[in-house]
């Protein structure tokens, strides 16, 4: 007897009629749950869509299709389910606090140093980038470095300095969480929890983040395919956390002229395959300061929902990733040029400075 793979057991989509009543939709939900399956509800502008997770052999699809308020029942064809645009046709918008979001017409900008080095550094950077309309302050407190001899970050002290600088400038915070035991501590100070490229397939960590109560920024692994990346996001969504942002940060190819290769084709591809917002990190992708701005502009033109840029008051003195960090003048010029591109394609870049 053939054992059905887990991904084949999951998932079908129930598309409700445009005029389906709340009572009819709830009746369909109850029918599915009575069969021992899980329902993920998505209320769109025209239709409510019910994503069914579990062994669909337990469910009589014919009976379900005949229920009042049901327009169609369709099996999802991709191995990733909840991240699929088939499941959720409308774009997801991830909100960070009351006034900041990633997704929609506004292009988010996340800017700040690679690592928090001290109070003066993070305070001056936050004040400057905020004055240009940046609403999300980035900075590493725990740094996963390739060498154990490289700067590893300030840890808890770094988190406190990051939060303090962000609050003074009315900004949200994004910073990396490296392990399950860091989630609770980092969540006290960060609005958006970042999963770095090295942890993209750390499935226990991804599962735990599904219960963290915070949005997650999931960076693409250095050698990951788009399908593998979406499957990693699936781990977070299946645990109930739908606030996931995908970040293209470059992949490892045969090319050595830049640190990595920024795969900008992933932006429109992901927009087609998934409903999750997509941002780009050209700083880590190219690793060379002079190439960061051109690739950031290209990412905006390609349709990215945001860009993540490393900014430092004195890049030549940075303890981490100085060669790819922009100084204040360079970042200001980049923001001006990206705003022009955003306007051209009918979008906005950050808040008004």
Image (cartoon, helix red, strand yellow):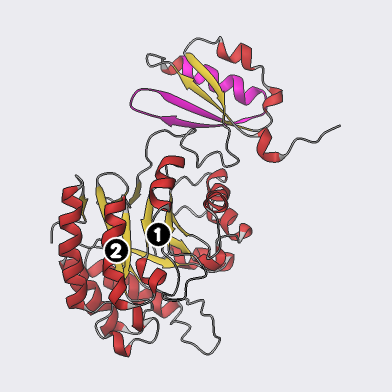
Q: Residue at x 50, y 55 (%)?
A: 212
Query: Which secondary structure, mark 1?
Result: strand
- Range of residues picked out in magenta: 24-51
Q: Residue furthest right?
A: 1
Q: Let me know if residue 339 is in the magenta part.
A: no
Residue wearing tag 2: 296
User: As rendered, which of 167 and 51 lies closer to the eye?
Assistant: 51
Look at the image and tell me in which quarter the N terminus lies: top right
Query: Which secondary structure, mark 2?
Result: helix
Q: Let me know if residue 47 is in the magenta part.
A: yes
Does residue 127 show up?
A: no
Percent position of residue 124, x then y: 22, 79
Q: Residue at x 46, y 79 (%)?
A: 155
**Closer to the N terminus: mark 2 or mark 1?**
1
The CA distance from mark 2 to mark 1 is 21 Å
Q: Is residue 122 above or below residue 218?
A: below
Q: Are marks 2 and 1 in contact (CB under 8 Å)?
A: no
Percent position of residue 165, x then y: 27, 73
Residue wearing tag 1: 192
């Amino acid at each position: 007897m053939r054992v059905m793979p887990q991904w084949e057991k999951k998932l079908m989509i129930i598309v409700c009629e445009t005029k389906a009543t709340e009572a009819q939709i709830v009746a369909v939900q109850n029918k599915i749950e009575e069969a021992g399956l899980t329902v993920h509800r998505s209320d769109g502008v025209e239709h409510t869509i019910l994503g069914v997770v579990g062994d669909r052999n337990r469910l009589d699809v014919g009976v379900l299709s005949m229920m009042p308020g049901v327009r169609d029942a369709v099996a999802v064809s991709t191995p990733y389910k909840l991240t699929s645009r088939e499941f959720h046709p409308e774009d997801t918008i991830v909100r960070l606090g009351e006034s900041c979001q990633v997704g929609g017409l506004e292009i988010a900008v996340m800017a700040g140093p690679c690592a928090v080095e001290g109070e003066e550094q993070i305070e001056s950077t936050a004040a400057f980038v905020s004055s240009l309309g940046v609403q999300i302050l980035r900075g590493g407190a725990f740094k996963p470095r390739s060498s154990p001899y490289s700067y590893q970050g300030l840890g808890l002290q770094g988190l406190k300095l990051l939060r303090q600088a962000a609050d003074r400038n009315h900004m949200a915070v994004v910073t990396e969480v490296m392990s399950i035991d860091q989630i609770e501590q980092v969540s006290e100070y960060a609005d958006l929890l970042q999963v770095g490229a090295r942890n993209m397939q750390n499935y226990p960590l991804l599962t735990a983040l599904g219960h963290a109560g915070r949005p997650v920024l999931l960076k693409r692994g250095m050698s990951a395919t788009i399908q593998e990346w979406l499957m990693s996001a699936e781990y977070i969504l299946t645990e109930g956390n739908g606030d996931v942002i995908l970040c293209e940060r470059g992949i490892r190819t045969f090319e050595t002229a830049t640190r990595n290769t920024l795969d900008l084709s992933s932006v429109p591809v992901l927009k087609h395959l998934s409903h999750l917002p997509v941002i780009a990190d050209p700083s880590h992708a190219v690793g060379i300061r002079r190439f960061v701005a051109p690739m950031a502009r290209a990412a905006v033109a390609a349709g990215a929902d945001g860009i993540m840029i490393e900014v430092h008051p004195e890049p030549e003195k940075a303890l981490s990733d100085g060669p790819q960090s922009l100084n204040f003048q360079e970042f200001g010029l980049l923001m001006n040029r990206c705003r022009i591109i955003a306007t051209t394609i009918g979008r906005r870049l950050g808040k008004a400075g």
